Amino acid sequence: MTQGVAEPKPLTYADGNPQDRIQFFDAKLILKPDFFGSPRGFKQFSDLVAEAVGNVKGIRYDAFDLSALRPRIREVMFLDTADFRLYNNSFILRRRTLYQDGFPIADPEVVFKFRNPDMALAASVDVRPQIAGPYRVKFKSEALPLKDQAGGFRILYSHNCIAPMSSIHEPDRTSLQTIARVLPPVAGLIGGSEARVELVNSTLVEEVLMDLGKIDFGKGITTKANISLWRSLGDHHVMCGEFAYQARFDRREDVHELVKQRVEELFIKLQLIATGWLYLGTTKTGLVYRLKGNPPQAHE
């Protein structure tokens, strides 16, 4: 520390706890639904990942034998006010349930997140719920392609809280008054006479998640790559696929510059190789909100 110059005080939440730091990096490519009429699409895209990795020095891709794997199935339910007030203010509220052989195998999860391109704003939102049970917080930077062309990227900051449904001991979990009490950041968006959140666009999502392989960027950073296929329950209409990989670190400052360069180069190379697969200008959540042709004013 420079003599006579005080170090800035760390930013804190209202209870004095320091603001969360980014400890996850996600790279995401939204993919057109055309290629996912059968499991063959997963293998084809895994081959494209291998091709892209082969064009970036210092990276290794260990592809899984997809014929020996079973996809994971989750039901995803988005909840919001009738006028999409949560999403229009960068909040996302959803419930996820993991299934196997047609039956739920785990406690459903409630996922609450604030996602915005402003990192400082995302960090300032205290997503911790007012509940007695366990929960976990994840603060992530998410790389997406540019909205109108392949070969670049933009960043969204996603401040998430995940809690098992059994941690929320409330008689009516869909009541807006309950949500305002359990999730204080949204309290100012909810009027005192409002009733319940609704299923966004009356759509339940079935997520088919398949791990493709592992990517080793060197310097201790290894990620698992996967594709999640989203389709609407009932008619099984395929909305999109999403290729993603996620890396965890203790501090962003400690990630080697060479690794950062490799991550960026691979993300751009893969876009250029898989240009025909890309579904630009949206996110999976954005597609669900736009199903009825009345797009909300989101910050994504």
Image (cartoon, rainbow, N blue to C red):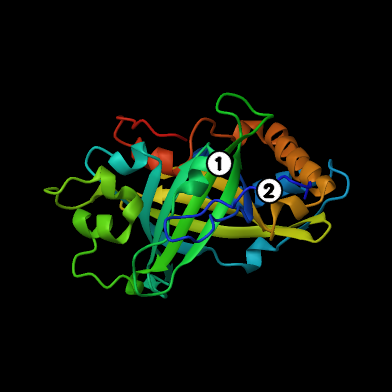
Where's residue 219, x and y in %? 84, 57
* Depth order, front residue of 78/158: 158
Disc 2 is placed on an element classified as loop
- Tag 1 secondary structure: helix
Spot the residue most to the top.
148
> Residue placed at 46% from the left, 55% from the top?
13
Does any portion of residue 23 appear in the rendered image? yes
Place of residue 282 in the rendered image (x, y in percent of width and height, measured from the top left)? 48, 34
Give, as a three-letter code, the residue at label 2: Ala
- Give the labeled residue for mark 1: 119
The answer to whether residue 95 is left or right of residue 158 is: left
Q: Can residue 175 be seen?
A: no
The amino acid type, in three-letter code, at marker 1 is Met
Q: Nearer the viewer, residue 294 or 114?
A: 114
Left or right: 290 as drawn, with respect to 170: right
Question: Residue shown at 35%/35% (left/top)?
Answer: 290
**Looking at the image, which residue sits at the far right?**
57
Residue 182 is marked as none
Residue 96: percent from left, percent from top = 39, 61
- Find residue 70 and report its image quarter: bottom right
**Residue underneath mark 2:** 6
